[in-house]
Amino acid sequence: MLSAIQQNPSCLQSILTIARMAGVEILKVYEQDFQVEYKQDNSPLTKADQLAHQIIASGLEKLFPAIPILSEESSQIPYDARKNWEYFWLVDPLDGTKEFIHRNGEFTVNIALIHQGRAVTGIVYVPVKDILYYAVQGTGSFKIESTKPPVKLQAKPLPKQGAITIVGSRSHGSEAMEAFLSEQKQRYAEVNFIPAGSALKFCLVAEGKADVYPRLAPTMEWDTAAAHIIAKESGKSVVNFENGQELIYNKENLLNPWFICQ
């Protein structure tokens, strides 16, 4: 499956097209008055989440009928049913629903291919700006702005001194994050903080606009998988904040540990 995407540009292009199609439907809702519902965990849900899920699931099933899909909007698949999946799609149809509701544009469509617990392909689409970020294992990370040609991404090395730019959640702060920022202010002469929503935070690191993204608050696997491989292929790592081990996917509990992208 991975080799098919690596070796066949039209295969990757088809997945990018699905992400863009989902983005088109999201924007149709975004530009209207819309209702907000709340799921059992009190997280918000809109018609845009549901429409994007339908488009992505339908598109991926037509292209790759043998590859199962795990999406935020269809996440109740028992672990016993998915634990032996070699490959599967891990999807967040609308990452940053709070940003969508606040109409600040900082929401994304996230599509990842997982192979044996590792993210090996990732697409992050920013509908409001018509920007695609994508990566396939072993081939690098890229950014496409509208109809411009792809640009290869190269993250900056983490600075040892001087100034550092940290990107963090716009909507999910924490005491631990404040402590992390205070610690960096002891190490660096200048600490710049960029608030951002959704998987955009990883992408800012991947394209060198930020040095590090610490996430010291809860996230789910579908929030991070697509952007994880984009950051990794740009030269960064995405690791458990406590033990430094790379994040893995398709765990029994789909909640991520605290992590840092740097």
Image (cartoon, grey):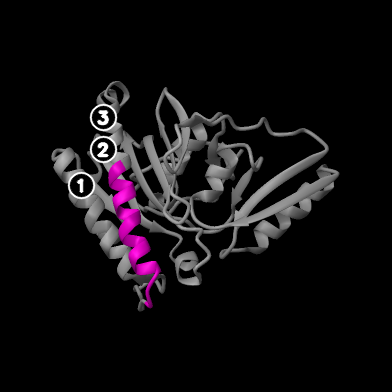
- According to the image, label 3 marks what residue? 10
Cβ atoms under marks 2 and 3 closer than 8 Å: yes
Kind of residue at disc 2: Ser
Kind of residue at disc 3: Ser
Residue 208 location, x and y as percent?
A: 62, 37
Q: Is residue 35 left or right of residue 86?
A: right
**At 44% across and 32% down in the image, what residue appears?**
149
Look at the image and tell me in which quarter the N terminus lies: top left
Disc 3 residue crowd, few under 14, some 14–19, many 20+, Cα 10 Å: few
- According to the image, label 1 marks what residue? 59
Image: magenta residue range: 17-33
- Mark 1 or mark 3, which has the lower sequence index? 3
**At 35% across and 61% down in the image, what residue appears?**
26
- According to the image, label 2 marks what residue? 14
Cβ atoms under marks 1 and 2 closer than 8 Å: yes
| Nearer the camera: disc 1 or disc 3 | 3
Kind of residue at disc 1: Gly
Residue 41 location, x and y as percent?
A: 39, 71
- Which quarter of the figure has residue 30? bottom left
Q: Is residue 197 shown above or below 137?
A: below
